[in-house]
Image (spheres, grey):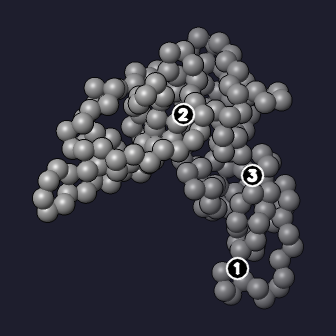
Amino acid sequence: MIDVNDLRKGVTFELDGSLYKVLEYSHHKPGRGNATIRIKARDLRTGTTLEKTFQSGDRVPDARLDFHNVQYLYKDGDLFYFMDMETFEQPAIPADVIGEAAGFLKENMEVKLTFFNNEPIDIELPTSVDLKVTHAEMAVKGDTATGVTKKVITETGQEVQTPYFVVEGDIIRVDTRTGSYVTRV
């Protein structure tokens, strides 16, 4: 059991038979009475978000998770195939588990998969990834003084806002947490 005061961002817990990962956490202590803990959490199976308020001192069941380092192999329809780096098993993960991370997955990339009772529930990407630009609009000369940005499309299909000087064929570094441009590599 986890005390609700320990529910910080990234903590996984069970509630009413569902598995949740905390996205936001806030602790409110009024002048009188017990403190309240408000969280925003994502159901790891369905992807829905839940906003819940707990009283200080409440407890929720802890979730025992397994983590495996895997290598991304390929995508076939709605399934993403990975290879476990230790056992060489090749689990197929549905696209709804991968979610928005699909735009950052490149072949042979190493990521961390989270399993609950041998069921894959979450993927953890590296903080940044280098992607090749496959489509970029042409920049207009003289439009760079104000920090203007444009949308480019990368090799994985991810759209990224970049400065005007990025052209097709460049390799850019993208922050996987925010989806934003970091630098040209």
Q: Disc 2 vs disc 3: Cβ atoms closer than 8 Å?
A: no
Q: Amino acid at mark 2?
A: Leu
Along the horizontal axis of the image, is 37 left or right of 33? Answer: right
Residue located farthest toward the left when viewing the structure as drawn: 32
Q: Is residue 109 visible?
A: no
Which circle, 1 or 2, is nearer the viewer? Answer: 2
Marks 2 and 3, Cα distance to the nearest angstrom? 23 Å
Q: Secondary structure at mark 1?
A: loop
Residue located farthest toward the front when viewing the structure as drawn: 33
- Give x and y (percent) for residue 53: 34, 47
Marks 1 and 2, Cα distance to the nearest angstrom? 37 Å
Q: Disc 1 vs disc 2: Cβ atoms closer than 8 Å?
A: no
List the residue tagged with mark 1: 148
Residue at x 68% of width, y 16% of height: 90
List the residue tagged with mark 3: 158
Question: Observer-nearest residue: 92 or 107?
Answer: 92
Quarter holding residue 28? bottom left
Identify the image quadrant of the C terminus: bottom right
Residue at x 32% of width, y 41% of height: 7
Along the horizontal axis of the image, is 58 left or right of 156? Answer: left
Identify the image quadrant of the N terminus: top left
Q: Is residue 18 visible?
A: yes
Residue 181 higher or lower than 140, as above or below: above
Pointer 1 local density, CA inside 10 Å: few below 14, some 14–19, many at least 20: few
List the residue tagged with mark 2: 44
First in residue order: circle 3 vs circle 1: 1
Residue at x 71% of width, y 45% of height: 103
Residue 62 higher or lower than 182, as above or below: above
Q: Amino acid at mark 3?
A: Gln
